Image (spheres, rainbow, N blue to C red):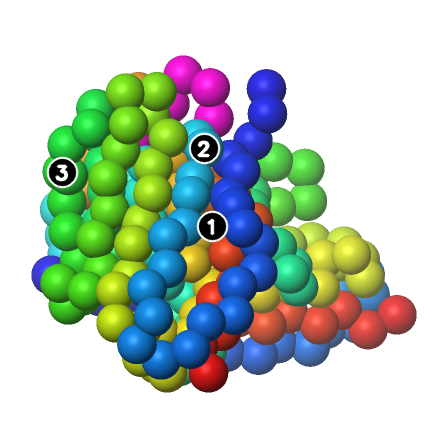
Amino acid sequence: GENVEQHPSTLSVQEGDSAVIKCTYSDSASNYFPWYKQELGKGPQLIIDIRSNVGEKKDQRIAVTLNKTAKHFSLHITETQPEDSAVYFCAASKTGNTPLVFGKGTRLSVIA
Amino acid sequence: KAGVTQTPRYLIKTRGQQVTLSCSPISGHRSVSWYQQTPGQGLQFLFEYFSETQRNKGNFPGRFSGRQFSNSRSEMNVSTLELGDSALYLCASSGVGDGTQYFGPGTRLLVL
């Protein structure tokens, strides 16, 4: 089955700097890659996702890139702000009716 | 549109008891998935229901079960609780089969 590895497990950046979180997956049939942000006491919130027919997707300060050949995808957050501090999870699945397989998470701390 | 709701939000049980958790999906969503989140294992898929039928099942013992009603609301049940069942139980709903899942706030279960 699918296996998703996520790095780093913790990341500290200065406010205004960029943050990059990387994930690799094992199943070449996976074609849907969402990213979730989880704040303390809350459920994961979908922040951006990408499907295998595109290589990059942007939404304001957040971008995701996908390299299907290497089977890895990354989350980029620019101009980080203290409110970006949270745990971020990557996931992979085949679209349709297959479950999400999650990475172990990255705890991002943005230092003001 | 209202988001995914889960009740109760917090629960304390003792070993050997059973527990039932409830999830109401986003209006119009017919797929409901359940995940267990623990610090050690991360987010792990339990099962998915679609139109009152279990469509996918994760690798959990038979003590974990679920069901879905005709209005798409779902319940999960854990019988003969063990200390290791202490976790955040998350429910996610999904609409037309593109795989996009939206999570609820979770039910935090503590087994003493």
Q: Relative to the observer, which residue lies in front, B62 or B34? A: B62
Q: Main secondary structure of the magenta part?
A: loop
Q: Magenta residues, as a range?
A: B26-31
Which corner quadrant of the image does residue B74 belong to? top left
Residue B65: say if magenta: no
Image position of B52 (left or right of A67): left
Q: Amino acid at mark 3?
A: Arg
What secondary structure is found at the residue carrying circle 3? Answer: strand
Image position of A67 (left or right of B27): left
Q: Which residue is mark 1?
A: A35
Residue B30: say if magenta: yes
In the rendered image of this protein, does residue A23 appear above or below residue B22? below
Q: Which mark is residue B55?
A: 3
Coordinates of residue A52 in the picture (x, y in percent): 28, 38
Q: Amino acid at mark 1?
A: Trp
Q: Are marks 3 and 2 on the same chain?
A: yes
Q: Amino acid at mark 2?
A: Ser
